[in-house]
Image: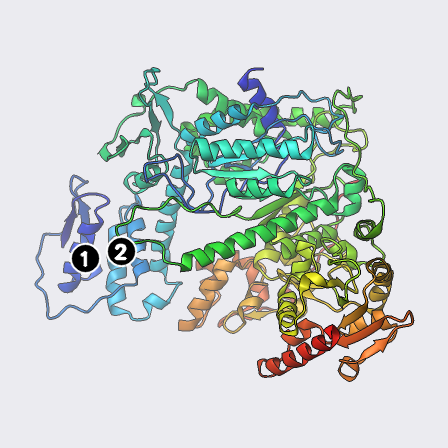
Amino acid sequence: MEIAAKLAILADAAKYDASCASSGGVQRDSSSGRGLGSNEGTGICHSYAPDGRCISLLKILLTNYCQYDCLYCVNRASSNVPRARFAIDEVVRLTLDFYRRNCIEGLFLSSGIIRSPDYTMEQLVEVARRLREEHDFRGYIHLKTIPDAAPDLLRRAGQYADRLSINIELPTQQGLAELAPQKDGAAIKRSMARLRVQIEAARGEARDASRAPTSIPGARPARAAAPAFSAAGQSTQMIVGADGADDAAILATSAQLYGAYRLKRVCYSAFSPIPDAASALPLQAPPLAREHRLYQADWLMRYYGFAADEIASPRTGGMLRLEVDPKLAWALAHPERFPVDLNRAPRELLLRVPGLGVKAVDRLLLARRVRRVRAEDLKRLHVPVAKVLPFVLAADHRPARSALPSPTAAPQQAALF
Amino acid sequence: MRVQLASETDLDGFRREARALLASRARPAQVEWSVEGGQEDLFAADETVMEPQGPAPALRVPPAFVELCQHVLLHREPQRFALLYRLLWRLAHEPNLRHDPLDPDMLQAREFAQAVRRDIHKMHAFVRFRPVGDAGDGAQPLHVAWYEPAHRIVEAVAPWFQRRFANMRWAILTPDACVEWDGSVLQLRPGASRAEAPPPDAGEQLWLTYYRNIFNPARLKLATMQKEMPRRYWPNLPEAQLIAPLAAEARERSTRMIEQPASTPLRRIPIAPAATTMLPPEGLPRLNAAMQQCRTCPIGALATQAVAGEGPLAPRLMFVGEQPGDQEDLRGRPFVGPAGQLLERAFAEAGIVREEVYLTNAVRHFKYDLRGKHRIHKTPSQQEALACLHWLREEIALVRPRALVALGATAARSLLGRSVVVRAERGTWLARGDGLQVLVTLHPSALLRLPVSQQARAFEEFVTDLRRAAA
């Protein structure tokens, strides 16, 4: 098969993976005169697809043959999609060529499971090894690890990759058992745990090494230090809307994953219609609005100090409201916490005001050290003033009790299944 | 008063002139800024030279302000010099300005800087090189890109491309300026025209193939796309020509996918058997494997794994702790976290070799509360300890220790079948129904929670208990 035909099939097969980030990792470049590429810590989105998602890495599958039969997956064994498999060197050449054209930050490689988890993982690791060792590639590499692969393969993957990820796939163990019978949820968690232990051990070593004297005057520069183990951490993806799990269950699972395994990101991928879908999963348009609210809720957990069950819990029906963002929904449900005084409230409380972001809050804190904050200052912060005002007190502003937007009709969310 | 700078991005010139102007007490409103070769202002005031009037106000600006100037100067806004000088003047005369993040002039400058930084970021992303001159004679091809930045950023961006593509010959052509890297020197040249850039090649077709196929037609979101990749960049992005046709056919493609009935699988690929747990034949391995499946109480579902005991069979002592902690849960081994390290220190003092005793827990899964990103240990309830009891009983029967040590109240209750006040009963041998002797002492994590002043003494007492157990 021609390389273009393979690329078409194996890019198409990879498009349901939501992750694309290329940030973090070890800083490096090729200005020493060796190697190709650089990684300066900030991810770069080199393009955007018409689905609004960024293209930062060459995201492909090594092969879309797969002996697992996960019902939500286009590449499952029982699907009739056309199949292809890249040779290892073809992936290496494509990555280097696109990189030299400045189309990508690096490679995001995943694969269907062929022969055995270990065999598949070995192939993925070999691509990364050739890029790093034979071509001295210094761009970003993200490997999707196969959960049942041997710990030693995981360790080698972490030496070459900036980021590793293992898909949790579905928010509940029960969903996984029903829709992905070959996948073992406990094995996925064990792999994540193993990664956290290794990532933290490598960070600890790097810290110790940075305290030791690094150079001797007049000596020849030593070889570059080995890259830390998966320096940009690990991430995961879960599919939303393929099983019956509600938002509360999804966020609770995310919170546990962040806490237990220190994931950098949990990506939510709205279950999307796929060609040649399994008959067990009747298809409909993907619940993109729900996916968006989940990302907002996730953000609140990571940067705003919200606990998962404050945002969505079984007590309140378990679903996020679709018509308002989760922070506004929380504020409307907690009128007793407002208004918040912009001139006095601590940072944690300011962060809970709808419309105020982390940056705006930090500027407010700086500003109020030198003067009283007034309502018009909000305009200069570029925050949605009308949204913020009902929830705050300022030197010249005191909202009327009735100013709070009244909670609208009961939350409505289209049934997903 | 008129001041002329050497170029549109002449930062050094600006700093020099601004310093002189401040020294001569020139008010911002009196100064007109222009650039050599730039458009003349018909209404320019006559050139007047102002003499310095006494010592200039001492001006020290925060380092962040210098960085701000660097970026603002690259903006195409003609008033940027005036704005920066006004800010400098105000910094010299208004002591509070540097602390006010909401000052309008400051915000305006920051907005300019932000626009320039964003433009720099987009140039990192959207420059597209095309190789030329790859005649197969071993000479490296030259990678050439045509690009149109929004602001005057070419010179500022060049070092980034130099660091990334140090071993590649490349050139970026723009209407303002061109920059070329030959592998050793970065050269700046005057602007060029689009016609000087090379046409598309076969490799670029591959890129278009990738772009076409990574797009999911069921999720068309053109507005989101345009927010991050505004139309002004499209003419120079080869893949942008695909946006309109892909968007046009997206609805039809996704409707077709939804309406299509499920097909009968051809089943060319053998489906792997579902993950079944094969239990090892017998003994401890079988017990430990069965334990992994235990969901009798809810804490099992939240933990990573059940943590089995470890150590030799028929040991002199079997130590029973409360439950695994964060590190034990991650590693799947008992006593490897901070409490485990303290226990090992105490072992060393008491003359106990870790490898010669058996270590396990009364409860097999980690119970915790999430506080932000931290899992905080939570004491298991009596019911949970009770649900786990049969694992401990079976383990004792298989390990056959000569005596038991209970670390803490939970372990003591599980081993003795009654609640135990550890402080009252510690350090003495107590008998179990089955005749095995149990010595009760504190859990090492209880020592870690004591105030520092009491730790040394408590550790000594703990070691004394262990010595008695080992004697």
Q: Nearer the viewer, residue B90 or A116?
A: A116
* Left/right of residue A75 with respect to residue B172 in the rendered view: right
- Circle 2 sits in a helix, a strand or a loop, which is it? helix
Q: Is residue B31 visible?
A: no
Q: The residue under label 2 is which amino acid type? A: Leu
User: Label 1 is found on which chain of the structure?
Assistant: B
Question: For the point 19% across and 40% down, which residue is it?
Answer: B39
Residue count near mark 2 (Cα–Cα under 10 Å), binned few <14, some 14–19, many ≥20: many
**A292 in relation to B309, above or below:** above
What residue is disc 2 on?
B84
**A393 in relation to B3, above or below:** below
What residue is disc 1 on?
B18
User: Label 2 is found on which chain of the structure?
Assistant: B
Residue count near mark 1 (Cα–Cα under 10 Å), binned few <14, some 14–19, many ≥20: many
User: Which of the 4 image quadrants contains residue B457?
Assistant: bottom right
Q: The residue under label 1 is which amino acid type? A: Ala
Question: For the point 47% across and 25% down, which residue is it?
Answer: A93
